[in-house]
Image (cartoon, helix red, strand yellow):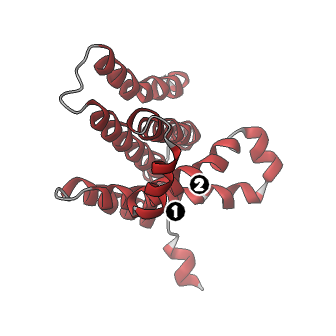
Amino acid sequence: MIKYFKPSIFVFSTIPFLVITYKIFFNKLGPEPVKEITHFTGEWTLIFICLTLSMSPLKKLTNFNYWVKVRRMLGLFVFFYASLHLFTYIGIDYRFSWQPIFDDVVKKKYIFVGFAAWVLLIPLTITSSQKMMLLLKQNWKKLHRLIYVIAILGSLHFIWLSKTIYFKPLFYFVLIIVLLTLRINFKRIFEK
């Protein structure tokens, strides 16, 4: 049963990609296809951020070590869906017209924080292998704490993007704050 755990998580993680691919090929994206792809990939990026952050609390809660063994893979799916989200914006929405993209990054705060979050994901993705973990030693852990900053930036990106409907973006923001709070070692703080 345990040997199927990681492959099962991988298969489930590809389902959103298969869903959006199906919608693209069978013209099921609705009246605003670019907006649909952008929102879909953006929301799944946030879902995978939340899943990645929930692995350590789940390990503590269930005493099941395999949660943290899939954390790295889930983190790579964060980068995958974030890159699809960014590519939709750059390639499909703006058709690689760099000047208006640059203007958006500079002038619109939700685009700036979204882009910053994606840039911060790059070193995490590059250093996600076991080899890099051994090479960087203690610095690996420090570097990978950037996921906390990325999570907050991602949720702010969604909040600032939403002009009228705030429930969903606020839900992700609160969930991320709860997941980050669960990682704090209060025992160590109060012992000092």
Q: In which quarter of the image is the C terminus?
A: bottom right
Residue type beneath disc 1? Val
Q: Residue furthest top?
A: 26
Q: Earlier in the sequence, mark 1 or mark 2?
A: 2
Q: What element carries label 2?
A: helix
> Relative to 51, is 152 above or below?
below
Q: Residue at x 28, y 20 (%)?
A: 23
Image height of 176 relative to 128, above or below:
below
Q: In which quarter of the image is residue 143?
A: bottom right
User: Residue 65: percent from the left, percent from the top?
Assistant: 55, 42
- Estimate how packed mark 1 is, as few (under 14), some (14 to 19) or many (20 or more) residues with alpha carbons within 10 Å: few
* Residue holding disc 1: 149
Q: What residue type is labelled 2?
A: Leu
**Disc on res. 84:** none
The answer to which image quadrant residue 107 occupies is bottom left
Q: Do the residues labelled 1 and 2 touch (CB within 8 Å)?
A: yes
The answer to whether 165 appears left or right of 13 in the picture is: left
Which is more toward the observer, 180 or 107? 107
Residue 7 or residue 116, whichever sits in front: 116
Give how far across and how far down residue 169 sits, in percent: 27, 56
Residue shown at 58%/41% (left/top)?
72
- The residue pinned by badge 2 equals 120
